């Protein structure tokens, strides 16, 4: 059985023209990008995606960051893809992310309200399926 994960290349990744490099790293690991689209997220879409964070103090800054420009959403498939892609992404904080990881090599803390760390990846198979349904409803 093939596992699936949602990968979002956040506005800073799109702005810095790192979409190709990030997807290249995922494909070089042997995973398959099976759906891809550019989305300008709305606050409503983000409220659904980040439902568990809506009442947190950092949430308004996160919405401001994620709505400032387009996001590239990718559906990625492969054996143990959640663990593999999350390893490729590196630690959430780019300052401490290991060299060789996407965040460790390409991101840095900008000192803003939201952590600009280039990418999001689902943290488990259940969350992946929930997030894929939000970002790719046409795949229902």
Image: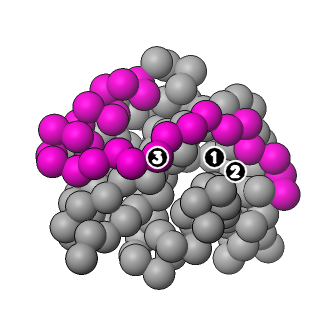
Residue 104's disc is none
Query: Which mark is first along the chain, 3 or 1?
Result: 3
Instruction: Indicate the position of residue 45 as horizontal and vertical percent values.
Output: 77, 56
Q: Disc 3 on helix, strand or loop? A: strand
Quadrant of the image occupied by residue 50: bottom right
Residue for point 63% across, 46% down: 114
Mark 1 crowd level (few <14, some 14–19, many ≥20, 10 Å Cα): some
Query: Which mark is first along the chain, 3 or 2?
Result: 3
Find the distance from the CA under tag 1 to the CA under tag 2. 5 Å
Q: Which residue is mark 1?
A: 114
Instruction: Indicate the position of residue 10 as horizontal and vertical percent values.
Output: 55, 39
Instruction: Classify residue 8 as left or right of residue 45.
Output: left
Mark 2 crowd level (few <14, some 14–19, many ≥20, 10 Å Cα): some
Label 1–label 2 contact, CB within 8 A: yes
Quadrant of the image occupied by residue 101: top left
Q: Which residues are magenta?
A: 18-44
Q: Which residue is mark 2?
A: 62
Q: Which residue is mark 3?
A: 35
Quadrant of the image occupied by residue 2: bottom left
Instruction: Indicate the position of residue 61 as horizontal and vertical percent values.
Output: 74, 48
């Amino acid at each position: 059985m093939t596992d699936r994960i949602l990968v979002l290349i956040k506005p800073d990744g799109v702005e810095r023209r790192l979409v190709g490099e990030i997807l290249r790293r995922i494909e070089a690991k042997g995973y398959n990008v099976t759906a891809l689209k550019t989305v300008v997220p709305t606050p409503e879409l983000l409220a659904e995606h980040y439902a568990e964070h809506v009442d947190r103090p950092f949430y308004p800054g996160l919405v401001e960051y994620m709505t400032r420009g387009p996001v590239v959403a990718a559906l990625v498939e492969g054996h143990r893809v959640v663990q593999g892609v999350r390893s490729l992404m590196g630690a959430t904080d780019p300052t401490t992310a290991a060299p060789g990881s996407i965040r460790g090599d390409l991101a840095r803390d900008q000192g803003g309200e939201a952590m600009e760390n280039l990418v999001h990846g689902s943290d488990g198979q259940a969350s992946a399926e929930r997030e894929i349904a939000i970002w790719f409803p046409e795949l229902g």
